[in-house]
Amino acid sequence: MDSSGFFLRSHTEVSAQPSFTFLYAPQKNMTRRLLIAGNWKMNLTLAAALELVEGLKKEAASVTDVDIAVCPPSIYVQPVAAALKGTNIGVGAQNAYFEKEGAFTGEVSMGMLTDVGCRYVILGHSERRNVLGESSEMVNVKVHAALDAGLIPIVCVGELLKEREAGTTEQVVRRQFDGSCSGLTADQMAKCVIAYEPVWAIGTGKVATPDQAEEVHAAIRKMIEKNFGQDVAEVVRIQYGGSVNDKNAKEILAKPNVDGALVGGASLKVASFMGIVRPS
Ligand code: PEP
C-alpha cells in the first residue's frame, strides 16, 4: 500500500518477485491493468511450446498496456520461463503443492516455481476442483503458500451448470471465494487475481454473455470489499474465463469489472491468443 492508501501495481512485471509499488491501468481505470493469461492445460510438446513462445514473443513485444502470461504444464515451466526471460510475457504454473519440500511424490512446490522464473500460479481451477477433488480449504492453503513464495495466485471460482440453473451462482462463488481466500491480510488479497470461470463455459464454446460475466464480477468485487475493504476491492483484478476467443473477447473485456481473461483453448495458437490481447 502506498502513502496515499492505495494498492498500486508495477507496470513492468519482469522479475520473479512481483513488485506492488506503482502504477496504472490506462484502458480500465486508474488501478487495474488487463491481465490476459493462457492456460495451456495438458497440451503441447516441448518443441510446440517453444515454437508458440517464439511467436508470442514477436507479436507481444509492442504491447505495453496489458499484462500477458502463459501457464504451461509444469514440466515445461522452466524452459518456457527461460525462453521468456526479459520479455513482457510472464509465466505461471497451473498448480503447485503447499508444502515447501519433503516426501510429496509427484508434487512441485511454490518455491520451485519462483526458482525457475515463474510469477503466477493458477489455483483452484475447476478441473482441479471437479476432476481432482480439490477443496476450497486446500486451495486456501495453497494461496497462502504461493504468496509466501512471492507468487501471484490466480484463484479460480465458478459455478456448475446445474448451480446456475438453480439460481445459486452467487452463493457458490461466495463459498469458493470465502474458502479460498480465508485468512489473507488486505495486503495479501491485493496481490491476488481472481478468475471467474463458469464451469459450463470452460472448453464448451458456450461463453457467458458480457452481462452474465459482469454481474458475477461485480458481485465478487463486493465480496472482496466486504472482507478486505474498498481499497483492496478497487485493485484486485478479476479475470473472466470460459471459451474466450478473439471474436468474443472485446465485448467481455469492455465490461467495467472484467480485468482480463484466463484463456484455455484459444491460448494454444499465436493468432487467437494475440487476438484476445489485442481484440479488434
Ligand atoms: C480455462 O482452462 O481456464 C478455460 C477457460 O478454458 P477455455 O478457454 O478453453 O474454455
Image (cartoon, grey):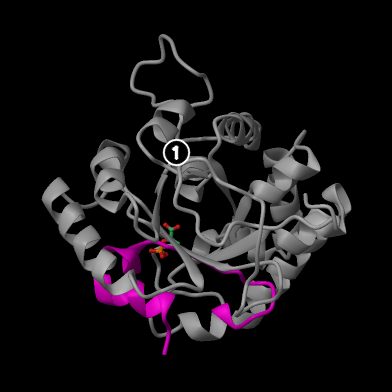
- What residue is drawn where x is 70% and y is 53%? 172
Side of 20 relative to 39 (left or right): right
Side of 93 relative to 55 (left or right): right
**What amino acid type should be assigned to the residue bearing mark 1?**
Asn
Q: Is residue 28 visible?
A: yes
Instruction: State ligand 1's quadrant.
Output: bottom left
Q: Which residue is situated farthest in the bottom direction here?
A: 280
Q: Which residue is situated farthest in the top direction here?
A: 103
- What residue is drawn where x is 71% and y is 41%? 188
The quadrant the C terminus occupies is bottom left
Question: Is 271 covered by the magenta stretch?
Answer: yes
Q: Position of residue 114 (x, y in %)?
A: 44, 34
Q: In this view, does 275 lie above or below 133?
A: below
| Magenta span | 253-280
**Label 1 neighbourhood size at 10 Å, few (<14), some (14-19), many (20+)?**
many
Question: Is 248 covered by the magenta stretch?
Answer: no
Q: Position of residue 132 (x, y in %)?
A: 45, 36
Identify which residue, 228 or 107, lies in the foreground: 228
Identify which residue, 80 or 219, lies in the foreground: 80
- What residue is drawn where x is 67% and y is 52%? 21
Q: Find disc 1 in the rendering and name its residue.
A: 95
Q: Position of residue 148 (x, y in %)?
A: 61, 29
Q: Is residue 215 above or below residue 49?
A: below
